[in-house]
Amino acid sequence: MPFQFEILARDSRTQARLGRIITPHGQLTTPVFMPVGTQASVKTVTPEELLDCHVEIVLANTYHLYLRPTHTLIRDLGGLHHFMHWQRPILTDSGGFQVYSLAGLRKLSEEGVLFQSHLNGSRHMLTPEKAVEIQQTLGSDIAMVLDECVPYPASYDYALASQELTTRWARRAKAAHRCAEQALFGIVQGGMYADLREKSARELVDLDFDGYALGGFSVGETKQLMGDLIEQTAACLPEEKPRYLMGVGTPADLLRCVKLGVDMFDCVMPTRNARNGCLFTRQGRLIIKNARYAQDIRPIDSQCGCYTCQHYSRAYLRHLFVSEEILGLRLNTIHNLRFYTDIIHMIRAAIGEGRLDMLTVEAITGEAGLEASA
Amino acid sequence: MPFQFEILARDSRTQARLGRIITPHGQLTTPVFMPVGTQASVKTVTPEELLDCHVEIVLANTYHLYLRPTHTLIRDLGGLHHFMHWQRPILTDSGGFQVYSLAGLRKLSEEGVLFQSHLNGSRHMLTPEKAVEIQQTLGSDIAMVLDECVPYPASYDYALASQELTTRWARRAKAAHRCAEQALFGIVQGGMYADLREKSARELVDLDFDGYALGGFSVGETKQLMGDLIEQTAACLPEEKPRYLMGVGTPADLLRCVKLGVDMFDCVMPTRNARNGCLFTRQGRLIIKNARYAQDIRPIDSQCGCYTCQHYSRAYLRHLFVSEEILGLRLNTIHNLRFYTDIIHMIRAAIGEGRLDMLTVEAITGEAGLEASA
């Protein structure tokens, strides 16, 4: 079954949509949050635990898998789903973002980007065609075009030239893409300039992708500016295609950006925070190493139905964390992932019942929501 | 239900016994292998996964839990079983072995052993009475007396004095033990001197413990010497009490020592080896990081029924290991634990069917068994 997207319900007072994505590996509901499984593993947890956490789709990083164990090896072993024992949908990124953030010695040209592996210094050329080829070889359900990630802040001239390069790369990616089973998403860039974001969106829409991502956000700009740009960009995108905000974000970001019309999110925050001992609850964040939890018999969040909250006290989780026990990282991860999917479920329910505008950051995170208005 | 032990079957050609231990937290069959959960966690895995691996009892380390989070805190939180979400039997050691192997600045006296915490240098006095008190406070099902662990090699005079101190400490521990629900085991010491081992065993048997451990083995002596001493010591112990060989060992050790009449074992080997990427199979050990497994689609062991072998290839496990993914440590641990319990099940079946003498090290480990005759 090739990629499909349909809108099931719209919120009347916001731009939010409730939708369904169908992929060769099953369907999922939007809005959706995608945990990050960088190296073909969502750190510390099994696929069965992801399902218990109500995860419907995961993201894997093309850059990492291309370098190790290599996309061709994964293909020879039966494809990424089989390799990592995850039979539900997978989205892969293009590898571009990691080239900019992790690799050594980058050289950007019209052709693509030359970089050195962060693992062993070996040189590689990533082009729009190569990024498509790698992702097709991995066998993900949704692939992303290669884009240039604009630094922040960037001058108007830089952002313009970069946006136009991203469009030319998107055209080449689209031309190179040969797999009807795999969706290909374009990525709107343009830095923090509303007119460039709009220009980028219109050019990409002309190329007719299966979905559109908003890239280059959460790089240091204010929440207000991010929100304004997302709203304006979303207005330039077709209603009938999914919109994916890359690398975002906090629970508050999810709520705010769904209201602006975003359907898909990914972020390392729930998993990375978990490993750092920062746990989300409906009463705010909890730093598990704090001495105040040493004798606390309560679960992380008494309203949470996750495996961790069903069986373990804050005191035990604190003990595991300060004792550097690996099990603690995993129990924390299970909780944070479930917290994120619970938020997404609350958001979906509110859209379905036409009351999303009444759902506040404070209601879902226990935090004042100041961040939301910052 | 207080502690009970009954022998269900005896092997006619060896000293092996098939037995049942009943504790306040349920029963288990012997011979049994106990994974080590040092800090109230068998590293990387949940209690549910332990049950999936057919684990029936775990060992926890009194030294670690006394220092952190403290035995009194664990008591206040509902006891060790509740704390770590493991409702089956738990054996705790006395803390002595870790004082000798981990703590700083030890000072041994008739009274006990003064030591400094390896965590923060704080000074503590561990006496036979204190070791009992800590274990009663933790609420384990089986407690161990404090012993002196004789260095290896040790002179006859040193070993004699140490053995006699261990007996005096055992008498004090027995007098201090006030919990009918908790079993208390004595520990036979005596270094590598058969007459001291025999003397130790007879003195402890006079004190009438619920079970008898063999301590101070696997410290550098030959397998032949270890086997001879175990055989001679076991002959001095009452048939109707369980025998526990502490800190041993390899799969070959388990088979050999069951034949000598040992009922219980604990060792970090399956879990520690797993985290180091050394996996047990019926065809010998497998070092998962080796390049030869990079494209190997087979499970670790095609005859293994563990979760890991049901769902993951050697290639994926190698990828996780070289990529330093935490999930790999856990999948490896699940496999090695299941391998150990599978071996124990093979041994039990062979005893029940009166053919234990026919079961060879090579049959259960795929290794030549040279180690066994060394």
Image (cartoon, coloured by chain):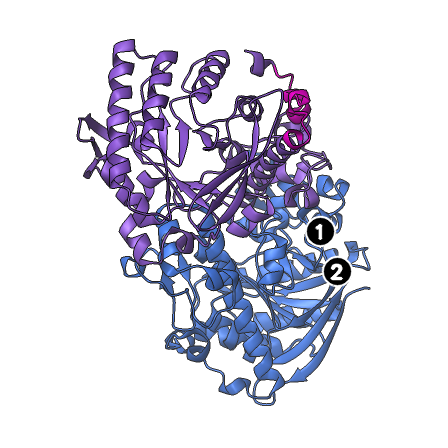
Chain colours: A blue, B purple
Residue A276 shows in this picture: no
Q: Which mark is residue A25?
A: 2
- Element type at marker 1? helix
User: In the rendered structure, does residue B360 fall within the stretch colored magenta?
Assistant: yes
Percent across and percent down for residue B176 are 24, 40
Magenta-colored span: B350-369
Same chain assignment for discs 2 and 1: yes
Residue A8 shows in this picture: yes
User: In the rendered structure, does residue A296 fall within the stretch colored magenta?
Assistant: no
**Cβ–Cβ under 8 Å for marks 2 and 1:** yes
Amino acid type of the residue that numbered disc 1 sits on in the rendered structure: His
Percent across and percent down for residue B165 are 24, 23
- Element type at marker 2? loop
- Quick check: A151 left or right of A173? left
Residue at horizontal 29%, vertical 54%? B73
Please give the residue where the numbered disc 1 appears in the rendered image: A81
Give above or below for B147 relative to B163: below
Q: Quadrant of the C terminus of chain B?
A: top right
Picture quarter containing residue A209? bottom right
- Quick check: A216 left or right of B174? right
Chain-order first, disc 2 or disc 1:
2
